Amino acid sequence: MSLSYRQPGVVLTDRHFTVPLDHADPGGETIELYAREAVASDKAGQDLPWLVYLQGGPGFGANRFVGREAWLDRALKEYRVLLLDQRGTGRSTPATRQTLPLRGGPAAQAAYLTHFRADSIVRDCEAIRPQVTGGAPWTVLGQSFGGFCTVSYLSLAPEGLATAIITGGLPSLHAHADDVYRAAYPRVERKVAAHYARYPQDVERARRIADHLLTHDVVLPNGYRFTVEAFQSLGIMLGASDGSHRLHHLLEDAFVVTPAGLELSDAFQEQAQSLLSYASHPLYALVHESIYGQDARPTAWSAERVRAEFPQFDAAKTLTGDGPVLFTGETVHPWVFDADPALRPLRETAELLAARTDWHPLYDPARLAANEVPVAAAVYHDDMYVDTGHSLQTAGAIRGLRPWVTNEYEHDGLRTGAPRVLDRLLALVRDEV
């Protein structure tokens, strides 16, 4: 039963669907999907084209907007929008430390999670599309990992798409995870250098925090083991438009004087744990590297292995001199499954996923080269999360794709640049500019 309700300027409807866990076995086990339909209040009775939104991640549910926030306001001017919680996220059969034991032990959990990549998400979309649109093709808007899914959609089921819009999410069609991270660490280093150029006082602050963590056993209030590597991983913030400023504010409140001497403040620890915890999105940590698995090679904790090729990220070595401590970016490491109480029960499951050697391709270069779906993509020139070179190479490999390369926005441009970013891409995809 669908339930409709109102927020300012919008009518929302809860939608529920049943899809196969394994689309290659349509008569087998099923899972439940949730999506929120949104339509402008003054257009609720109109026959409008559909736009399905695929969130970034992997592992995050769709945005929980209030009213007509951000890009949704622009989209609602001409579309009914379906905000899909991708499988395993939000209200779509969530995959967490609490639910995964229902599958059995780590081997069964790992086998289950192989069905939570972009190809399965695309098949979910195609399974529910006839129920939503009556069979008509729809527009897909893919942000970040949602863009990866959109390229899979163009590869696997382009007949389901009227148009495709991608923001910060053109993946390499061929790169192994090792290639992705070898390109990523230098990008992150440049972002860190830019942060320290903006806030030079943070060099000494970060060194003091790193030194404290190397010489003290710190456990955050939620039970997270706060190591220097965990502290460095807060650099993931630097990929957002306001991330450098938020990191600066975090660092300036790090220490307080107590009867026992300097300690990390409660306020700092509270903020750090909210940024570090995977409790709300454990699937991100579990399947993050698997989104790059496309052949018989295991991902094998790629980010951790490749980091060893960049010794400048070793905080302990840095502190023997007077250089700046480097933060890291969008990487998942095996130690996080020991540090984070939301992930500890899933450590063996993660190890099994990292060791898998039977990944299959997510993209079809030949089909993309013959693409007939109108496609436009925003490529952010200074994107910390997705390599610009990889994105432009893929843009050239998809027939008819119109890229918009800009340094006006960071990876979160769809949020911060709304509605201009969506306006620009809609104009591009319609050949209006």
Image: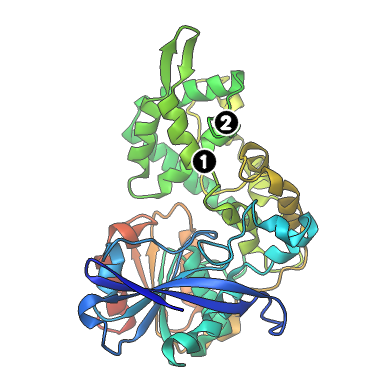
Task: Say what amino acid the circle numbered 2 marks.
Answer: Phe
Picture quadrant of residue 333: top right
* Quadrant in which the C terminus is drawn: bottom left
Q: Is residue 305 above or below residue 398?
A: above
Q: Are marks 2 and 1 in contact (CB under 8 Å)?
A: yes
> Residue 69, position in %: x, y?
27, 62
Q: Which residue is at 39% across, 32% downward?
A: 250
Q: Which residue is at 58% across, 61% downward?
A: 94
Q: Is residue 298 visible?
A: no
Left or right of 282: which side holds 207?
Answer: left
Q: Is residue 387 visible?
A: yes
The number of callouts visible is: 2
Distance between the alpha carbons at the discs numbered 2 and 1: 9 Å
Q: Is residue 427 above or below residue 344?
A: below
Please, what secondary structure does the residue beneath circle 2 have? loop
> Residue 3, position in %: x, y?
39, 74
Disc 1 packing (10 Å; few <14; some 14–19; many ≥20): some
Numbered label attached to residue 276: 1
Q: Is residue 21 above or below residue 102?
A: below
N-terminal label among 2 and 1: 2
Residue nearest the viewer, comparing 299 with 216: 216
Residue sitting at the far bottom? 135
> Residue 184, position in %: x, y?
53, 51
Residue sitting at the far top? 259
Task: Say what amino acid the circle numbered 1 marks.
Answer: Leu
Residue nearest the viewer, comparing 392 with 294: 294
Please, what secondary structure does the residue beneath circle 1 have? helix
Numbered label attached to residue 226: 2
